[in-house]
Image (spheres, rainbow, N blue to C red):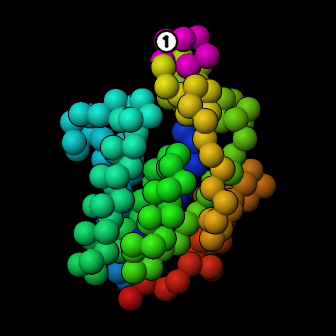
Amino acid sequence: MITWLIGMSGAGKTTIAERLYGRLKPDCRHLLLLDGDTFRDVLRNDVDHTIEGRRKNAERISNLCRAMDGQGIHVICAVLSIFPEWLAWNRANFSSYYEVFLDIPLPTLEARDTKGLYAGGRSGQIPNVVGLHIPFPRPCNSDLVLGEAEQALGIDACVDAILAQMPKLD
């Protein structure tokens, strides 16, 4: 099973994925948490944040997840995911796929902006910011959408909502 958390920077993907992992791991030995930023670090940031670099990174992440899935390893993946064709590829190529969209509006993300990404993008210091310079195509086939109202209930409430609807892991 691949659980794919999608959302723009600051939407809560990593935070929710980490909590979900913590809840599932005690009962699921074969579980991997894969975060988009950490994945880039592991590969020594050898691709940039242009559309082309992001596409290459998306292909790598999906192919790694397919390899893990083929070995019976469940993956919780927290990534930006700006390529609808890769979301469709995921759904067609994983044995079981559950997609969660963290639907947080840009003004809220800019208010959070813990990494200074949006401020840097607005000032011109950081190029290729998704939501500002690169469009974020809204996923249209997500299995679950969590918005501001759900996040206002807290991280555990978001994880509870995911666990209530996603297929059980073996």
Other residues around mark 1 within 10 Å, as few (<14) / some (14–19) / many (≥20): few
Query: Could you tell me residue 87's position as x and y percent?
Result: 50, 60
Residue at the extreme right of the image, as rendered: 149
Q: Quadrant of the C terminus?
A: bottom left
Query: Could you tell me residue 117's position as x and y percent?
Result: 52, 25
Q: Quadrant of the N terminus?
A: bottom left
Residue 123 within the magenta-colored segment of the rendering: yes
Span colored in magenta: 121-126
Query: Could you tell me residue 51's position as x and y percent?
Result: 44, 34
Q: Name the residue carrying label 1.
A: 125
Callout 1, which amino acid? Gln
Work out whether residue 137 or residue 117 is closer to the camera in this orientation and state it: 137
Residue at the extreme front of the image, as rendered: 85
In-image side of 121 versus 49 (left or right): right
What residue do we see at 62% from left, 27% from top? 132
In-image side of 88 versus 28 (left or right): right
What residue do we see at 62% from left, 46% from top? 137
What residue do we see at 58% from left, 48% from top? 7
* 54 up-or-down from 140: above or below: above
Work out whether residue 138 or residue 12 is closer to the camera in this orientation and state it: 138
* SS assignment at label 1: loop
What residue do we see at 52% from left, 72% from top? 98
Q: Is residue 145 among what the camera can see?
A: yes
Residue 58 within the magenta-colored segment of the rendering: no
In-image side of 149 versus 115 (left or right): right
* 3 up-or-down from 44: above or below: below
